[in-house]
Amino acid sequence: MTTIEPEIPTIGHVKIVYYGPVHPHWGIDKRFGDDAVIENFRQRVAARLNFVPPHDPQFRRNKERVIKDAEREGIVVEWDLGFDDEEVQE
């Protein structure tokens, strides 16, 4: 028996930008959505990514957690790491 999960409507959109090795490393910019919802999401993302640069092995796991969190919330996430994501070594 196949279970079909209901599609969650999109309620917001954020762009996550890696600024480089200088603090702050990450920018989480709202494109659209409720301010309170986006701010709560921004705090969770910042906690996951704050001290983890994209070349750190923990980054890939944390990125997947951010993506799953966004999917549950109905938030579209756009990533700008400053380079092609495939360049990151595992």
Image: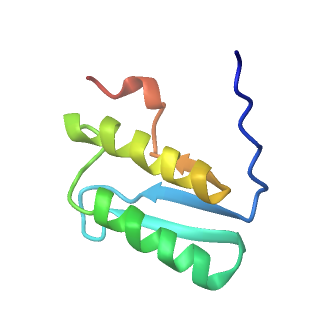
- Residue sitting at 44 percent across and 23 percent down? 86
- Residue sitting at 50 percent across and 69 percent down? 41
Which residue occupies the extreme top position in the image? 1
Residue 18, image x, y percentages: 40, 55
57 in relation to 1, above or below = below
Which residue occupies the extreme bottom position in the image? 36
- Residue sitting at 61 percent across and 62 percent down? 14
Residue 44, image x, y percentages: 39, 67
Q: Quadrant location of residue 21? A: bottom left
23 in relation to 20, above or below = below
Front residue of this view, candidates 22 and 28:
28
77 in relation to 84, above or below = below
Q: Quadrant location of residue 3? A: top right
Quarter of the picture containing the C terminus is top left
- Left or right: 43, with 38 as reference point: left
**Visible in this render: residue 24?**
yes
- Left or right: 74, with 88 as reference point: right
Residue 88, image x, y percentages: 33, 28
66 in relation to 40, above or below = above
Residue 10, image x, y percentages: 76, 57
- Left or right: 56, with 66 as reference point: left
- Residue sitting at 30 percent across and 58 percent down? 48
Quarter of the picture containing the N terminus is top right
